[in-house]
Amino acid sequence: MIVAALAVAILAQTRIASDFEIQQMEQQVARSKDFLSQLSGHLNLGDLRLTRNETAVARREYAKALEIATNERLAARRASEMTRYATATSYAALAQAKLGDAADAFALSEEAIRYTSDSAKSWNLYASAMAALGKPAKAVSASRNAVAIASRENDRLDLAIDQYALASGLLDLNQTAEAETLLVDVVASLRSEAFAPLRREVARTESFEIYSTARGKQAAYISLLNRSQLRLARLYEDRGDIARAREQYAHVLADRSDDPTALAAMARLSTSAEERERFYAAAFDANPFSLPLIRDYQKYLSGSPPTSGAPPTSAATSGSQLRLALQQMQRGELIAARQTIDQLMQKFPGNDTLQLLGREIDERRSGGSDLRALIAGFNNNTLTAQQRAELDQKTFTSDVIFDQGPPFETGRIDTVGFRFSQPATFSGTFAAGTRLRLTYRILGATQLNGADALLLEPVRLENPR
Amino acid sequence: MTPLLLAVVLAAADRGVLVAQSGSIEMFDRTATTQMWSGEGLQTPARIVTSKDQAVIIDPLASQIRIIDLVSGRGTTLRTGETPIDGLFLNGRFYLLERDARALERIGTDGTRASIPLAADPAFLRQAGGRIYVYSRTPGMFQEITTSPFAVARGVNVAPFASDLEVDPKNAYLVYPRGGKIGVVSLTTMKSGGTFDVGAVPVDLAIVSRTLAVADPSAKRVWMVQGQESFARAFARGFLRGLLGLGLAPRNSDFPTGVDRVIVPYAYDSSSGTLYRFSKSKSSIVAKNVAPEGFAVGPAGIYVWEDAVRRLQRFDGND
């Protein structure tokens, strides 16, 4: 299938899945100056950036969309074109909702609907704004109005869009039975003969892009089919019907092989370690910055042997780099993990996911014990001269386990690694891998196998009493 | 374009003027100069409904109301059905229209609550002759509700998608922006009395004596229709087409911008936040940058919250 082949080609280039849509929307914004092109371009760019957790960029796009909609409202009102005014007002409401301004979004939605309560599209936009605000009951009510109106009209695609919005709201309200019926109907309708001409047109134009504000029947069809199947699959997954969930996710991947949501789900639902690794790798390549995917992967790593999560050495793509960082975090190689994240941050400077992971690494490096706080003090150069002088005078005694020896050079105090400045031998009989009692001075911070560690000067070694 | 001005909701009550803002409510005397009390409000107030002794702040976004004692300012906040949009006091009880819950709720003075289901999208709530009337916009259902028993008594299918409803003792009037029409329902028979054309895009309606004032933002005009005359002719001819049309009836009032709300003799443009006073064909600006609920008409004039100076202003008829 041409659509799938195109998607595979994108995957082979190891681009993030949304790269293409972002490029398309940027071109649309640059070339087309009409209201809907500009507006949908910026709304889609905001949504696409948001899937990558680039919230600052996303907010700039939404703010631009709001500005465009506001100007359109003004122009329409001056021209006494009330339907145009209402449409612009609906989009202004949606942009405000995406910016998180609930009061303005609600007021604008209400203002728009005064003029166009007979429009399924207006109610759909109302529902979208309420959904964006986390008001699913309001979204469901608006969607019911949209469905009621669209049902009287003869446009099956518009009806399916409204049914999908209704199902989404119902799922948010945990009303799964009606939602499932709607989603099954939507998917069946979209896959029916009624849409065969549109499917042929999609195939002919090799279209595959997925947008939240789709323009034109082709884009709407592709996006709606993708979203409906994903929603239905998640519904099946949540109730434990894994076979049907996998079937729906597979349908999504058949149309678009780099769909990040479906790939992440297939990784979750994999039946073998090899399959799981493969899907995780593909999911991270499709969207390295999805927090749900990252948390899934961390959970998977924490329940797996330390060697799992291959390949740690490959960092050819942003996705594999991020997986590498997570694996390093899991193994406690926090310095290396921070370096990996820092490299990614140079490529994606405004990314919230990377900043969050960076903070989490820093917190782990500085927290957890007095010794780690001390290491952080050395690393950050925050110890005062007086504190350093006190440390020089002071000896400490801890239970330790040496990695190998004698002679002894490296080991752990609880979970904190340490290293001597040179290998040391002690009078007496001592073995690596057993608990021993070490008296020492702290010289500074160092690294051990990529993790933060203490640099110690040994004073005395004893067997524990 | 002025951004939507949402922060303030005003209501004129017998005891004074209420000003609700996010999280607070104040009461001023009728001169708008002295604050009588202030108290806790709701986060996103959109409307205030008053009786002689009480006021109810309605927050449709948060689905909450706050019932307030007008003497002390003390109140109680209640969770409601989804999206309460309007309310009214009748026979000592409060009736609340919950649009997205599709219900009318009755709240007694003792706090007892009862609810009846309504048709989809109940958008307007009015009262006349001791009865309550609700228009459900999407299906076009006009329902009459009795208070004792608290039940839907009668209903009639009318045209859907009206943008406003007003009632007088005999009739209900529905405004249809898309068709440029006013629909009439007889409250006596609960039957449709037909429609007649008004303007280009009529949106809002007010009734003063027997005159209908219809705000038409597209025409930048308030159309004045003689109600009784209209109905006599409407019934005689089955319906009135082109009673006013786009012609220049002498009492119509023109505005420099499109007004979409009317409370005679005032009209308001939501898009610019401009409040006008009009008389016959003339109009003058009362205030700018006024929120849609940021003004209230009372016996001593019109009260306006001036956001720029954060003050309540009163304008009498001569201002």
Image (cartoon, coloured by chain):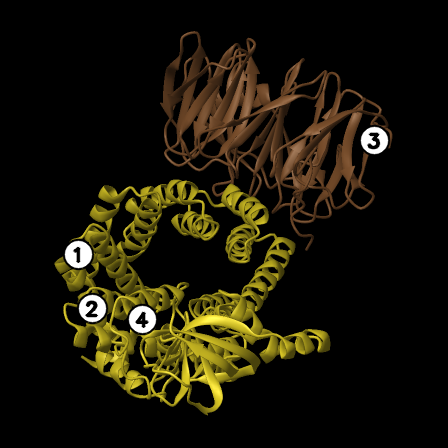
Q: Is residue A341 visible?
A: no
Let me know if marks 1 and 3 both belong to one chain.
Answer: no
Contact between labelled residues 4 and 2, with CB atoms less than 8 Å apart: no
According to the picture, the residue beneath numbered tag 1 turns out to be A188
B294 left or right, relative to B237: right
Structural distance between the alpha carbons of marks 1 and 2: 15 Å
Element at label 3 = strand
B279 left or right, relative to B293: right
According to the picture, the residue beneath numbered tag 3 turns out to be B315
Contact between labelled residues 3 and 4, with CB atoms less than 8 Å apart: no
Shown in yellow, the chain is A
Name the residue type under label 1: Ala
Structural distance between the alpha carbons of marks 3 and 2: 64 Å
Host chain of mark 2: A
Q: Position of residue A369 (x, y in %)?
A: 50, 65
A440 left or right, relative to B250: left
Q: Is residue B70 visible?
A: yes
Res A300 quadrant in image: bottom left
Q: Position of residue B229 (x, y in %)?
A: 58, 21
According to the picture, the residue beneath numbered tag 4 turns out to be A260
Residue A220, relative to residue B227: is it above or below? below
Structural distance between the alpha carbons of marks 2 and 4: 28 Å
Element at label 1 = helix
Structural distance between the alpha carbons of marks 4 and 3: 61 Å
Shown in brown, the chain is B
Let me know if marks 4 and 1 both belong to one chain.
Answer: yes
Q: Which mark is residue A197?
A: 2
Quadrant housing the C terminus of chain A: bottom left
